[in-house]
Image (cartoon, rainbow, N blue to C red):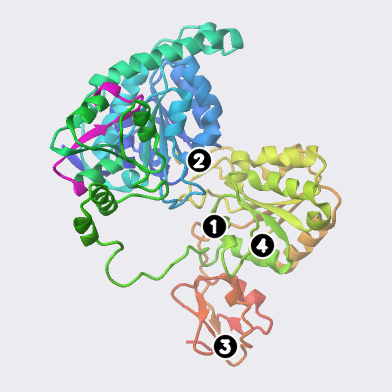
Amino acid sequence: MKELLTGNEAIARGAYEAGVVVAAGYPGTPSTEILENMTKYPNIKAQWSPNEKVALEVGAGAAIAGARTIVTMKHVGVNVAADPLLTLAYTGVNGGFLLVAADDPGMHSSQNEQDSRYYGRLAKIPVLEPADSQECKDFVLLGLALSEQFDTPVMLRTHTRIAHSQTLVELGEPLVTEVKPYQKNPQKYVMIPAYGRQRHLVVEERMRQLAAWAETAEINRLEWGDRDMGIITSGICYQYVREAFPRATVLKLGLTNPLPIEKIKELAAGVEQVFVVEELDGLIEEQVKAMGIMVQGKELFPPVGELSATLVRRQILLACGRQEEAEYLPRQPQGQEVPNRPPVLCPGCPHRATFFMLRELKLRVAGDIGCYTLGVLPPLNAIDTCICMGASIGAALGMEKANPEEFKGRTVAVIGDSTFLHSGITGLLDLVYNGGTGTVLILDNRTTAMTGHQPHPGTGQRLSGEAAPQVDLAAIARACGVKRIAEVDPFELKAFRQILKEELAAAEPSVIIVRRPCALIVKEKNPPLAIDPEKCLNCGRCISLGCPAISKGEDKPVIDQALCNGCDLCARVCPVEAISSKGGEA
């Protein structure tokens, strides 16, 4: 039976068919739906972990104990998980271990567009790259089998187009698998230096064996066609290449680390020119050139953003001297340009009140990763820095240390509840331990909102929907040594302003828990508001909130009744009480 599945759904289906027992991860687009779809299969014990490092450690323990395991995360999450990953490559596994790393070329929802294949080379582990949903499912089964055959973690690298595109998938029955027996083996699983040196030799030998396997693997296939050119490619780029040059000779790589050297040489010997088409960095190209084979790659294709069939065809035609054909291709989408629609905080979002207040007080704001990062955009313009998950508190401390006159008493760190539990606690410890006096705002909206409202240890719920113990954020702050802790609803503007001023003036670290649930989870049932044009001064304070329900009218601001959820923040900032649910606007 065939079913239309996204790549993420297909990976979850592959986990089910492969007999996966444990699955862990941290939500992050484009990987989030993988673990969410695993909840459809009751035999898989799927969980959100506080961060990617913990998820990988849970997966490592499960694999060493003998269970087939999958760990999922987006590309920047692999940075967080890199420490245990590189050592797990030394220890090896027992049950199969598959790490799904979802890259984001084009930075649709990420702070960078790094190439996860580097981690495969760095850790010296196999890297599989599926080109459609069918391969997403198939490569899960293959990756876990490879993991057990070669005693290694395996990376499955996917990315946005593969994760969210749908293709038909042939469904299979689940394999009959059992948890493998565990045997105590400190020389294999305890990486003290003496044991680690011996395991490093195992890693190098394993890579040699994998390189030999790559030469005969069916997932690395030579598709002979016209001999005027040969194209080496993998993943989604294979689809672009096949659309651009349906009759070309192509070496489709399903395994991109290690590369099948002899197959690459066979391709090069059989065609006139060789091209490498890969998104982001030229990892394949670099290795092919190191073999002494002349290829063209990144001089034709950008190392940033996504490729397309049109771009691939144009650039290769130009390289082949076929300018007339290349110039015929469109350089940009035909028709009128689509107006830019930057993302905005939702109507009723509690973060809007927070950033309105921080802007009003003209504070320096070290930001973090989440919905609230949108506070950097006009008209709020409230965030100074955003580096990575959990970096806000350390960055604020660094600012204070570097220039106390400029930043002390004028700087806050802003971090969400899920992000704080992910990697903000250590930053708070550092702030206290090293004598900082900064104020940390934990924006507690009781969910991981940006990635689709996943639960976390502060929500009282697990991925499965079961009830869970609920973390006390104030108690964590006290345990870190913070003595000044306040809680406030950000819509209570006067109280919020007063607390901010008091904590910023204090000569010691403080935490303000800014608590109000996400507007999309706890939906207000208040009637929409309207602006009385007779009272309105046209001062622009309501517009400055950046609420998508408020716009400039012909003469004065107006509120879209269909978008407004009645949160009344605009009414609270209006100096003449021109906004109410009984306003003069129809």
Q: Spatial distance from mark 4 to mark 3, Cα to Cα?
A: 25 Å
Crowdedness of circle 4 by 10 Å Cα count: few (<14), some, many (20+)?
A: many
> Mark 2 or mark 3: which is in front?
2
Q: Spatial distance from mark 2 to mark 1, Cα to Cα?
A: 25 Å
Circle number at residue 76: 2
Q: Amino acid at mark 2?
A: Val
Q: Spatial distance from mark 4 to mark 2, Cα to Cα?
A: 31 Å
Residue at 50% in and 38% down: 77
Q: Amino acid at mark 1?
A: Cys
Element under disc 4: loop
Q: Earlier in the sequence, mark 2 or mark 1?
A: 2
Residue 44 horizontal/vertical position (percent): 38, 29
Q: Earlier in the sequence, mark 4 or mark 2?
A: 2
Query: Is there CB contact under 8 Å for labels 4 and 3?
Result: no
Residue at 56% in and 27% down: 83
Q: Earlier in the sequence, mark 1 or mark 3?
A: 1
Q: Which residue is mark 1?
A: 518
Q: Which residue is mark 4?
A: 490
Magenta span: 243-263
Q: Residue furthest front?
A: 321
Residue 352 horizontal/vertical position (percent): 60, 64
In the rendered image, residue 261 lying in the magenta stretch gets the answer yes
| Above or below for 327 versus 260 | below
Q: Amino acid at mark 3?
A: Asp
Query: Is there CB contact under 8 Å for labels 2 and 1?
Result: no
Q: Amino acid at mark 4?
A: Pro
Element under disc 3: loop
Query: Is there CB contact under 8 Å for labels 2 and 3?
Result: no
Q: Spatial distance from mark 4 to mark 1, Cα to Cα?
A: 12 Å
Q: Quadrant of residue 135?
A: top left
